[in-house]
Amino acid sequence: MDITDARPDDCPELLVLQRCCWVQEAILNGTLDIPALHETLEDLRDWTKKWSVWTLRDGHRLVGAVRARLDGDRWELGRLMVAPDLAGRGLGRRLLEHAEACAPAEARTFVLFTGARSVRNIRLYERAGYRLTDVPDAPGHIPGAVHLEKDVTEREKPGPPA
């Protein structure tokens, strides 16, 4: 399975995958108030123009994706998703590593968030070197979410994986 740049015609499948993944997050976190569940196809098309987005396919099937963008010196990662039937096979880790490797040279910190009760996600991020940095009163804070960061200033920035 190869990770490739998302194409505009991936958007309908991305929306379906996103809903499948975030329904599980809603159940785990006891809330339907999750932005990813309320996005429309047009919302998704808009963010694919503002974020770098990568997809993972198994043959013709879209099975994973991740997005990232630079905000100052922070490389924001988001919408890391893997088809629920393929969870636990290292695909999320591959997508995360790819998004990190694509960070521009000016990025100093990787940042992301997940549900406070999403133990599996938090474990993945902590194993990848992220630490919880939640500040509930911070601008943009999403209730029920935890924020994680990873310092990358010491890391040499390789180019995107082949």
Image (cartoon, rainbow, N blue to C red):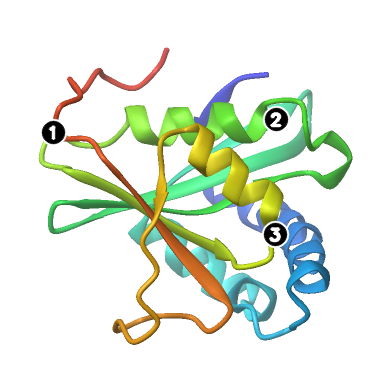
Amino acid carrying mark 1 in the image: Ala
- Dot 1 crowding, Cα within 10 Å, few <14, some 14–19, many 20+: few
Left or right of 54 in this view: 153 = left
Counting residues from the start of the chain, the first of labels 1 and 2 encountered is 2
Residue denoted by label 1:
105
Q: Position of residue 154 (x, y in %)?
A: 15, 27
Tag 3 secondary structure: helix
Residue beneath label 3, please?
Answer: 18
Label 2, label 3: how many angstroms apart (C-alpha)? 14 Å
Q: Residue furthest right?
A: 85
Evaluate whether residue 5 shows in this view. Answer: no
> Observer-nearest residue: 17 or 118?
118
**In this figure, which residue is indicated by the disc labeled 2?**
57
Mark 2 and mark 3 lie on one chain; the one further toward the N terminus is 3
Pick whichever, 91 or 60, lies toward us.
91
Q: Crowding at label 3, few (<14), some or many (≥20) Cα neighbours within 10 Å?
A: many
**Tags 1 and 3 touching, CB below 8 Å:** no
Element at label 1: loop
Quadrant including the N terminus? top right
For discs 2 and 3, the disc positioned in front in the rendered view: 3
CA separation in Å, label 1 and label 3: 29 Å
Instruction: Name the amino acid, label 3.
Output: Gln
Residue 150: quadrant of the picture: top left
Examine the rendered structure and indicate whether residue 132 appears above or below residue 82.
Answer: below
Amino acid under label 2?
Arg
Left of 103 or right of it: where is 146? Answer: right
